[in-house]
Structure formats: structure tokens, C-alpha cells
Image (cartoon, rainbow, N blue to C red):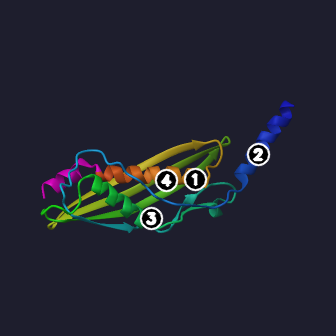
Amino acid sequence: MLRLIITLTFSLGLINACALSPQVVDIYPQVKVSGPAYGQGRQVDVQVVDKRDSQILGSRGGVYDSSSTITINNNLQSAVLATAQDGLKQLGFNGNSGAQPATMVITINQLTYDTKQKNLLYYVDLEASISVTTTIAGNKHTGNYKTQGNHQFGQAPDAAKNASILNKLISDTIDRALSDNNLAKFILNN
């Protein structure tokens, strides 16, 4: 009986490892920005640039690694823009001040998903990298922000789980950028 259970467990593990279907995920990050509301009513125009080469984030692994991709379904630039605008509103940017308006360009440099399987466990490594350049009256401030995530699963994560961990990664990266004390000082001093 024990031999049968071990054989079935091993067989199921092999079936899981053999072929994984491609996944498409929706990205809708959310932020709850911490720190003081340094916007003080200033107007800010936000733009998002996606410098990644592809909508494909990486592979889910398995025997057919190159075809078991994970891809973004929606427009990442629009999702990041909406999230950044929401975060800036939380920080007091609303256009009600006479202060010099600011321009903020968020550049998405990298968003990756990498899976390795070892001993019937799936290890998922994520990385997001953005840069934020803020300009006020010709003065510029640029900050670079990178967030990494490492997750372990007993089986390959489904699309909902992958969307959840990717949204958290992107949310954390945007939150770190908007909560940056150096950015706050730059805006308050210009």
C-alpha cells in the first residue's frame, strides 16, 4: 500500500512537471502610501513609459519551458499610471496650490517572473525595477527602485495566485518610490 501511495505521488509530481499551460494575468496594483502628505496641493502630471522588450514576463517552467509563458493581459502602463495617480492623491497632490507644477515620468525598466522546480516544489522569483524622474521648473530628481520577491509553492501557482504576487510586487515598488524621502525633499524644496 505504501508503495502504491509513493508511486502515485511521484507520478502526479511528474505530470505536474511535464507540461504547464501558458497564463495571462491582469495587473492592477494598489498603494497605501506611508509618510507625510508632501504634495501640499501641487499639480503633478504623471507619465508612464514601459521600456520592457515584451509583454511576456517569463516562463512557468515545466518540460515545455519556452511555451509555458506568463503574460500580462491588460495595459501595464495604464495600470501603473492609475496607481501612481492614486498614490499621489494620497500624498496631497491635487492641483489646488499655486506652487510650480511638477512632471513625473515613471519608467518601467524590468518586470520578470522566473520559476525553478526542485524536489517537487516550485520556486518563483520575481523582480520589478522602475525609475522615477520628477521635474519642477527645470530641476530634476531621479530615483531608482527595485523590488524582488521569492515564493515557494507545492504546485505550480494558478493565474489568480500569480496575479496576486505580481500585483503585490508592483504595488510595493510604486509605494517605495512615492514614499521616498529624497523625492519628498526635492518636491518640498522646489
Q: Quadrant of the N terminus?
A: top right
Earlier residue among tags 4 and 1: 1
Estimate the x, y position of residue 141 in percent, counting from the top left: 21, 59
Q: Is residue 187 magenta?
A: yes
> What is the CA distance from the residue labelled 4 to the residue labelled 1?
10 Å
Q: Which residue position is annotated with label 1?
A: 160
Mark nearest the camera among 4 and 2 is 4
Q: Which residue position is annotated with label 4?
A: 166
> Which mark is on residue 55?
none
> Which mark is on residue 76?
3
Earlier residue among tags 3 and 1: 3
Secondary structure type for disc 2:
helix
Circle 3 residues within 10 Å: few <14, some 14–19, many ≥20: some
Residue at 43 percent of width and 60 percent of height: 110
- Provide the residue span drawn in magenta: 179-190
Apparent side of residue 78 relative to residue 101 in the rendered image (left or right): right
